[in-house]
Image (cartoon, helix red, strand yellow):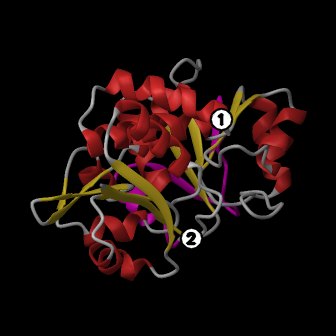
Amino acid sequence: MKLYAIFGNPVNHSISPLLHNYTFKKIGFKGCYTRVLIPQGEKLKEIFLELKLKGVNITVPHKEIAYRLSDEVRGVAKEIEAVNTWIEEKGKIVGYNTDAPGFYESVKEFEFKKVLILGAGGTAKAIALYLRGKGYEVVILNRSESRLSFFKERGFKTYTWEEFEGDGFELIVNTTSAGLNDQLLPAPKQLLKKLFKEAKYAVDVIYNKLTPFLTLAKEFDLEVRDGTLMLLYQAVLANKIFTNFPQEEIKKKMFEAIKLV
């Protein structure tokens, strides 16, 4: 039996164990998936090795630390510099990022050209770089200046709350944890209201919850979506890395599993 887990802080809300364990069982893979609370990101590798895990998913706030602690990084994670999936391979910890393609799959039917991303963490990096690579115009808005250097160095337009001047965004994406365990908004309410007056879509990467961000967006008749589809698609890609089973078979079982939540 191979052991897998999700690492993060918080992690008790995660439905990843349900998704992966259901899929493991249905495809006949001998694996077990659990949750592990990791308050300190520096302990990720130590705990991974101590528990003799074969793979993990890594959630907030540890994706950038996971990138630095990986023995090897593959695919789009190299550019993003954030990792949300580890697998043990011949004694090495190999890092991947399935957030970026997972998010794209969840919104690709939307009609938009210009995107505003709220937040500047690992998920924001993944989405920003991937969407720009698909030809979209991407702008970053964050509370403070300190975390914007990554985006500035790569040619993105960036703003803090105080200096923000952008407009014309069809899609607004919240990548912060605001609203996960509280009633906070990811940016000042008046600023969000102004953005929502012109937008068409609002997406929150927080899943299975109508966050204050999405509640406010609905008041402006935007089409809203939480992070459930993104979670599903990134989980399909992660499970493919874990098991090497056919992706379409994994996708079918994952979409069955989400109905059990």
Q: Nearer the viewer, residue 33 or 183?
A: 33
For mark 2, give the secondary structure. loop
261 left or right, relative to 131: right
- Kind of residue sitting beneath label 2: Asn
206 left or right, relative to 190: left
Q: Which residues are magenta?
A: 146-173
Can the viewer see residue 169 in this picture?
Answer: no
Q: Which residue is mark 1?
A: 260
For mark 1, give the secondary structure. helix
State which quadrant residue 68 falls in. bottom left
Question: Residue 48 at x, y = what percent?
Answer: 32, 72
Up the image or down, 32 lies above or below 39; here it is: above
> Quick check: marks 1 and 2 in contact, CB under 8 Å?
no
Q: Tag 2 or tag 1, which sits nearer the N-term?
A: 2
Question: Residue 210 at x, y = what percent?
Answer: 79, 43
Q: Which residue is mark 2?
A: 9
Question: Residue 172 at x, y = what percent?
Answer: 65, 39
